[in-house]
Amino acid sequence: MDLGSRNGSNEYGVAIGNEATFTKEKYQKEGGLLGMNLLRLTIERAKSAKEAMEVIVDLLELYDQGGNHGYRKKELYHSSYIIADKKEAWVLETSSKYWVAEKVKDIKSISNTITIRGKGDIRHPELTENAMNKGWCKNPEKFDFYNDYRDKFKIEQIFALGMNRCMRSYELLNRDMGNIDETTMMNIFRDHVPIKKDWNPAKDATYRSLCVHQKGIFTITQSTITMVSVLDDKIQTHWITGTATPCTAIFKPIFIPGGMPEIGTKTTAYYDSKNIWWQHEKLHRLVLMDYNKRLGLYKKDKEKLEQSFIQNTRDFIKK
């Protein structure tokens, strides 16, 4: 589960989610590859989850990672990835050119924080030595990637609350273990944490929520697009909102192999009435003015339409 175009998949059934993480290694202001560059290049090349991981680490060794990830302001960070195919899944977490990977055994969630404890299942050959040389680890036998590479004092790390979202998603995934399907995942991405009755994102937005709404200086970003992937032997179905905040949006199916639907004009930073993202963003902002009442006006119709998409898709794949 990836909580953040940081998502991608290809015709071989390889799906990747990417998250920003904050580590003790220095960030390259110029040069290197962005986390999203690495994701795109890997989707173009890999035919399995394991191969995708190998592509990323090879590119890191050749070019390292770096550059400005921001659009209107400078954002420097490293990346973590959750990578899956039809047979297995891996989590790969990086700190500059250094990395560690862990095979997913049942469920796994990533967000804006390092999650792998200890030495993982496989790692960069100099991962522990590098930490020892820089004084982050005193005893190689007690090396812990989470403790030794995570920059817990970095302001972005503190405000991102990545571990809070991970723990909440684990709570929800464990609750539905054995019965997780498309609807389960969609509902998890819509979760706002049971903070209080009549919770309203216009007033109570927080990064503790899996569905993030922007509000003020402490929650400066929001969920901009959400993807749930079903990797079937015959055809892959990717349920994509294509719009912000999944709690107000509808997940729509895209098939691989298959074509992309018509989505109108290209999304830019400026309002465009012909663009699907901005059409929904106008709705989203109107809903926030009286969240519980206005969402209630169309929530049942939205859920009914979404369930019809899901049932029709399942029937189609069975044929």
Image: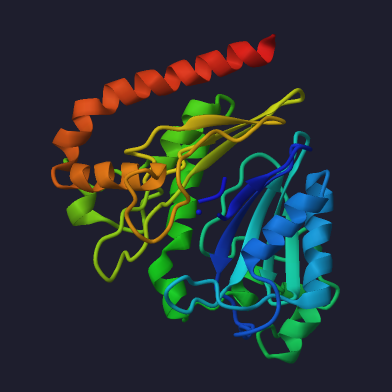
Front position in the image: 207 or 296: 296
Q: Is residue 207 above or below residue 312?
A: below
Which residue is depicted at the point 30% across and 21% down? 301
Vertical side of 290 occupied by 182: above or below: above
Residue at 63% x, 62% y: name it. Answer: 36
Q: Residue at x 47, y 70 (%)?
A: 71
State the residue at coordinates (76%, 84%): 130
Q: In the image, residue 278 lies at what x, y percent?
A: 35, 48
Image coordinates of residue 269 in percent, x first then y, are 39, 61
How many numbered discs sit on the rendered protein?
Answer: 0
Specify the quadrant of the image occupied by residue 204: bottom left
Position of 225 with respect to 148 (left or right) is left
- Picture quarter with the N terminus: top right
Relative placement, left or right, of 72 versus 62 is left
Q: Which of 293 and 284 lies nearest the eye of the viewer?
A: 284
Q: Position of residue 90 (x, y in %)?
A: 72, 50
The quarter of the image holding the C terminus is top right
Query: Left of 200 or right of it: where is 7?
Result: right
**Residue 148: percent from the left, percent from the top?**
64, 77
Report the coloring of the rendering.
Answer: rainbow
The image quarter containing residue 87 is top right
